[in-house]
Amino acid sequence: AQTVTQSQPEMSVQEAETVTLSCTYDTSENNYYLFWYKQPPSRQMILVIRQEAYKQQNATENRFSVNFQKAAKSFSLKISDSQLGDTAMYFCAFLSGNTGKLIFGQGTTLQVKP
Amino acid sequence: GAGVSQSPSNKVTEKGKDVELRCDPISGHTALYWYRQRLGQGLEFLIYFQGNSAPDKSGLPSDRFSAERTGESVSTLTIQRTQQEDSAVYLCASSLVGGAMNTEAFFGQGTRLTVV
């Protein structure tokens, strides 16, 4: 069975600084996708960034980028130039390309301080 | 609809009563997921529907929990004989095709269930 682990329950960063959130996963599959979702206090889940496992190039979306290390099964999220609006809970997620099952890590609460 | 819709948004029930939570996915989305999120915690997988395939029920915590889906539309999650430990936000998500490239899961706002 697949598992997703986020080992940082809480993190904080000063506005305009850079922060990295960690995620590791375990799977025996080769066909899968990885995601980072953001959940602000409104509770609405928002997709931040996605990565296809077959792509070696790390995904980037504006201030958000990932460091995907397939052999190490690691998928960290880097937020550059942190903004107050980035304050939220961040979830790492694994999507099986074989079954379509989508599972999440425990989440990291990020606070951006002014 | 424009997004995933869940109802009710809040539900308070007495211990021992049955509750039914509803999810209307985005039209045309064949994959539908249910998750439980306790306060300040992660998303706990409950069940996954994909088209007409048998659902993946591996996350249902006990036989008090069940879910159904009518074709590729509305889904209901039923909790029988509710317990205080069932208090949580129940989130529903849908995606165009489970497991396909560029498949983003879209989430509803959730149902906050409180068992008193």
Image (cartoon, coloured by chain):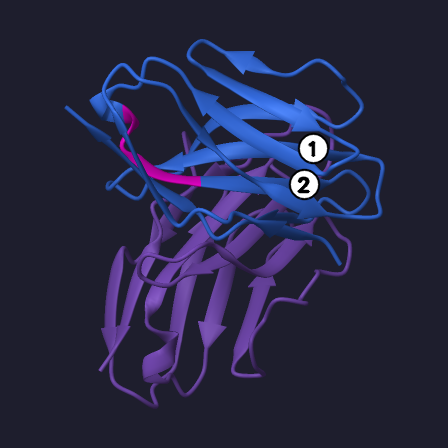
Mark 1 lies on residue: A33
| Chain A on-screen colour | blue
Q: Which element carries disc 1, helix, strand or loop? A: strand
Q: Mostly what secondary structure, the magenta segment? A: strand
In front here: A100 or B23?
Answer: A100
Left or right: B64 in relation to A90 = right
Q: Quadrant of residue B102?
A: top right
Q: Which element carries disc 2, helix, strand or loop? A: strand
For badge 2, the amino acid type reads Leu
What residue is at 38 percent from the left and 82 percent from the top?
A: B18
Chain corresponding to purple in the figure: B
The answer to whether residue B102 is above or below residue B73 is: above
Alpha-carbon neighbours of circle 1 within 10 Å: few (<14), some, or many (≥20)?
many
* Quadrant assignment for the N terminus of chain B: top left
Q: Position of residue A68 (x, y in %)?
A: 66, 26
Of labels 2 and 1, earlier in sequence is 1
Tell me which segment is drawn in magenta. Answer: A86-90
